[in-house]
Image (tube, grey):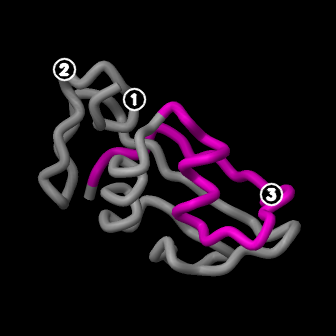
Amino acid sequence: MPLINSSFTSLIRNPGGATLAEYLARRFTYHAPEAWMRLLALGRLELEGAVARGDERLREGMRLRFTVVLRGTRGAFGFPGAGTGSRTGLPA
């Protein structure tokens, strides 16, 4: 199991009929859409307390949780953190 640095919780605002993957790419631009898809595949995002897939249709006020892994760790998924330039272990 990877060491958890922290997690961030956000309430969905103005989803505009988007799926979670679309919303992430539009709202949180510090990762490319492909990086968000990888994080979703790794189970690092939860929507309303359940592991998110990315294809969920969003509603105003839904709770989104994003788990961040410590830099320099290697998690259960073999997801490296060192030397990536990002706390999430993805290229910046």
Q: Residue at x 37, y 59 (%)?
A: 37
Image marks 1 and 3: residues in contact by CB distance under 8 Å: no
Q: Residue at x 37, y 42 (%)?
A: 69
Which one is in front, 26 or 59? Answer: 26
> Which residue is the site of mark 3?
11
Disc 2 marks a residue whose amino acid type is Gly
State which tag comes first along the sequence, 1 or 3.
3
Disc 1 marks a residue whose amino acid type is Arg
Q: Looking at the rendering, in which quadrant would you find the C terminus?
A: top left
Q: Residues within 10 Å of mark 2 (few under 14, many from 20)?
A: few
The image shows residue 41, relative to residue 35, as above or below, that is below
Residue found at the far left of this picture: 78
State which tag comes first along the sequence, 2 or 3.
3
Does residue 89 appear left or right of residue 76 in this picture? Answer: right
Magenta part of the protein: which range?
2-30
Numbered badge on residue 87: 1
> Which residue is the site of mark 2?
83
Quarter assignment of residue 74: top left
Q: Residues within 10 Å of mark 1 (few under 14, many from 20)?
A: some
| CA distance separating discs 1 and 2 | 10 Å
Circle 2 SS class? loop
Residue 21 colored magenta?
Answer: yes
